[in-house]
Amino acid sequence: MGALHFRGTGLPDERQVEYWVDQGVISAEPIPGAETVCESGWIVPGLVDAHCHVGIKFGCGGGESVGGLIAQAETERDAGVLLIRDAGSPVDTRWVDDRPDLPRIVRAGRHIAAPKRYIRGLPVDLEDEAQLPAEMVRQARAGDGWVKLVGDWIDRSTGDLAPLWSDGILVEAIKAAHREGARVTAHVFAEDALPGLINAGIDCIEHGTGLTDETIELMVAHGTALVPTLINIATFPQIADSASRFPIYAAHLRDLHSRAKDTIGAAREAGIPIYAGTDAGGSIVHGRIADEVEELKAVGLSPVEALGAACWDARTWLGHPGLEAGAAADLLVFRNDPRVSSDALAAPDVVVLRGNVVKTR
């Protein structure tokens, strides 16, 4: 495709912007002969799903086929998600980097768990927690600057959510990942695993429904980020209904769900950086980033904050540029203001990936 030209209203500052694109890169300087794609509309960087599992087979928990994986990535792309933080996948997705028509993926390697303490077929299971630091190093080298821990899960011996790791091994393991230049995040539903993870220097918490005033203060002090995956939290009652064998666990999930809006709202009020992630893959269908942004508004983020959590702010957090000269041309155009509703955000009129128009409406 030849050079392209875009004119419209940029977000978040609502200023009139004009971009030219050539060889997949944005230019602020006019390019003679460029084809004008739009004369008006709302122009934003490609959206980000900061907790998305490309490569997990829907409803099964195992690895997806190549064809299924491509379909997942295409669904995200068509919803405007052009950058994915893949928060744990059982299959190698490196080959996606060679597909200019598929979103960019920031990988966290495979989940790290203990035997029978996570979804079957997804994690690397460690028989002894002393293996954790070395495994963190392996996953750091397999990923793109992130490592994913399972921080808590149901312990069938007690019938409730419980931590997987001791505080001491977490300190050693997170330091090992940091020495490799990787950041660490963890799946955490309940309360008990949070202090050890945060005090050990973890960079991000996924879900975070068990946050308390004390652990919120700890996250603020440590600069820990939060990706709450609110559309996944909405499924807690359904999960509880299917867990009749473990009534304590089921009651705990229902309680976490009942106060989730207040919990995440308190985290936002305290100043914890919050980013949008759907947890797509497994039990959440792909392509729902607009729904997650809407849920972020419901817990107290302003429309600009909520969209930023899935766009410009999330890109900065993951180390990817927005719309600036010399950056890759990953952008969206909307006829309607994408801050207004999930319907508007879910329907980008133009999707440009690596300088190529891959979708128009």
Image (tube, rainbow, N blue to C red):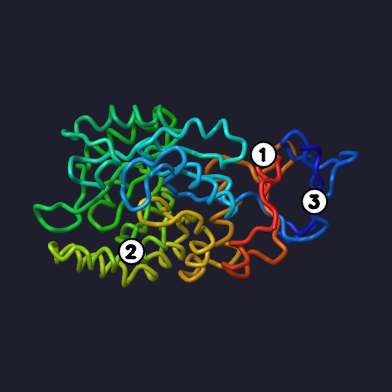
Give the residue number, with chain letter if any, for mark 3: 37
Residue lying furthest left in this view?
Answer: 157
Instruction: Point out the tag, 3 or 2, that comes first from the N-terminus.
Output: 3
Residue 186 place in picture, x, y as percent: 34, 46
Residue 255 place in picture, x, y as percent: 26, 70
Front disc: 3 or 2: 3
Q: CA distance from mark 2 to mark 1?
A: 43 Å
Instruction: Point out the tag, 3 or 1, that comes first from the N-terminus.
Output: 3
Binning the other alpha carbons within 10 Å of mark 1 as few (below 14), some (14 to 19) or many (20 upward) gives many
Q: Type of residue at label 1?
A: Arg
Image marks 3 and 2: residues in contact by CB distance under 8 Å:
no
Q: CA distance from mark 3 to mark 2?
A: 49 Å
Give the residue number, with chain letter if any, for mark 1: 354
Q: Does residue 275 appear in this view?
A: no
Q: Is residue 284 above or below residue 265?
A: above
Mark 3: secondary structure? strand
Give the residue number, with chain letter if any, for mark 2: 213
